[in-house]
Amino acid sequence: MVNIGLSRVDDAVAAKHPGLQQYAACQSHAFMKGTGTFVLGTGVMFALQRALSRRLPYPFQWTVLLSVVAGSVGSYAVTRVETQKCSNLWIYLEMGRGSEERATGTPSMESPEETGSTRKTTRYGDVME
C-alpha cells in the first residue's frame, strides 16, 4: 500500500498511475491555498468594514456576513484556478501532453527533422520508433 496524505492506495493503482503522488500533492496545495484565502479574505474584509463602519453604520452581523461571503467567493475562485492547474498537471503526467494539445490534436512543437530522430507519437502518448 502506498500512502497519499491520509489515504492508502493499492500498489497496483500507484504503479498504473506514476503521477498520482504529484497530483495528490498539487490538490492538497490547492485546497490549503483556498483555505488560506478564505481566512485572509474574511479577515481583511472584516477589518475594512470595521474601518468603514464609522462612516456607514450598520449592524455587526452584516459586517460578519459580508466578510464571510467575500472570503468564500475569493476562496472559491482561488481553489478553482489551482484545481484546474492540478487537472492539467494530471493530464500531462498521464498522457505526456497538455490539455491545449489534447483539445486541438496538434503534435508537439518539435518535428523529427529538428530532433534528429524518427520517433512518432501516437494520439495516446506512446512513442514509436
Image (cartoon, rainbow, N blue to C red):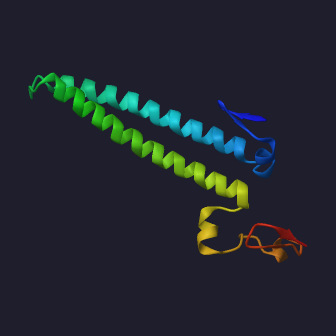
In which quadrant of the rendered view does residue 50 lie? top left
In which quadrant of the rendered view does residue 126 lie? bottom right
Q: In this image, 66 relative to 118: left or right?
A: left
* Position above or below: 22 against 51: below
Report x, y in % for residue 98: 64, 61
Quadrant showing the N terminus: top right
In which quadrant of the rendered view does residue 124 lie? bottom right
Give the total number of marks visible in the rendering: 0
Q: In this image, 96 relative to 56: left or right?
A: right
What residue lies at 65% left-to-right and 30% top-to-bottom?
A: 6
Q: In this image, 79 relative to 66: left or right?
A: right
What residue lies at 84% left-to-right and 68% top-to-bottom?
A: 127
Report x, y in % for residue 57: 8, 25
* Position above or below: 18 against 44: below
What residue lies at 45% left-to-right and 30% top-to-bottom?
A: 36
Report x, y in % for residue 89: 64, 52
* Position above or below: 96 against 123: above
Quadrant showing the C terminus: bottom right
Report x, y in % for residue 109: 71, 70
What residue lies at 33% left-to-right and 25% top-to-bottom?
A: 43
Along the viewing direction, whichever of 71 and 8 lies nearer the viewer = 8
* Position above or below: 46 against 107: above
Q: In this image, 110 relative to 49: left or right?
A: right
